[in-house]
Image: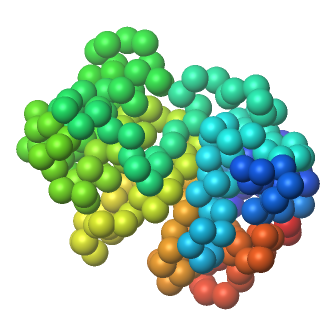
Amino acid sequence: MQSESGLNKPLLVLRDVSIGYDSSLSLVNIPNLEVFPGEIVVIAGPSGIGKSTLLRTIAGLVSPISGVLEVCGCILPESPPRGNLGYIPQKLGLVRHASVRHNVELGARAGVKSRKERQVRSKEAIEIMGLSEKSTEPIRRLSGGQQRRVATARTLAQRPKLILADEFLSELDEETLASVLDAVTNYVRESNAALIVVEHDISRAKMMADKLLVIDDGRVNPFIKGTKAMEVNV
């Protein structure tokens, strides 16, 4: 676990942040939250309570109603440096008529200018996700679970400092889920990055989380049961 001291500065800071699409109706209020390099933070709670909106706000797609939100050293609405933030949305945002390789290279383009390096990164990410035999297949021919693996490979090829993932483990069978989660977790630990995940399965959330946050009645509360999840002061 990383500490706040020295060079281990948080990759995400929220101070008195309220989020929502209507300034008169806040969905979630977060007094204080910090996410450090090497951490996996899981956000859980009922459907429609603001989990995805929180990720979209961190990604800069939705403006916070109030408060200060700092991402990779930049205070929104200033954008973090290109490639520093990776986002896997629920709807994935893949180019359906294009190949797996093309979609993954789109992620690599955000992280590096060299064409050769983009190809190396993309090939590696496709292999990690077990999609080498599908690299020339168009997205529209893939199953839902395979498409989620492509979206994850696209983000890994980008090599961001902070990954936001919205239900990225859904539609995966248990064996594939374990391999995808291992790959992303290994990336986070080895690259000193951070991962913030929206997850509906509370048992899986407790298993993977360093910090497990439960949104309940408009507030983010720490959930400290389980063998791994730790208490968070919010």
Where's the C terminus, which quadrant? bottom right
Give the farthest residue toward the top.
114
Picture layout, residue 198 above or below residue 175: above
Res 154 visible: yes
Q: Is residue 73 left or right of residue 85?
A: right
In the displayed structure image, the side of residue 231 where residue 92 appears, left or right? left
Kindly identify the residue that appears in the image at 11 percent across and 38 percent down: 137
Residue 193 placement: quadrant: top right
Q: Quadrant of the N terminus?
A: bottom right
Instruction: Say whether residue 144 is left or right of residue 158.
Output: left
Q: Position of residue 76 (x, y in %)?
A: 78, 33
For residue 91, above or below residue 207: above
Residue sitting at the far bottom:
225
The spot of residue 229 in percent (x, y) is 65, 76
Task: Please report the residue visible at 29 percent of the width from the left and 45 percent of the height from the top.
Answer: 150
- Along the line of sight, which residue is nearer the eye, 210 or 134? 134
Where residue 220 sits, quadrant-wise, is bottom right
Q: Residue at x 79, y 45 (%)?
A: 64
Q: Position of residue 66 (x, y in %)?
A: 88, 47
Q: Where is 141 relative to 60, above or below?
A: below
Q: Residue at x 42, y 58 (%)?
A: 168
Q: How far across and how far down the image is residue 158, in percent?
A: 44, 32
Q: Nearer the viewer, residue 62 or 153?
A: 62
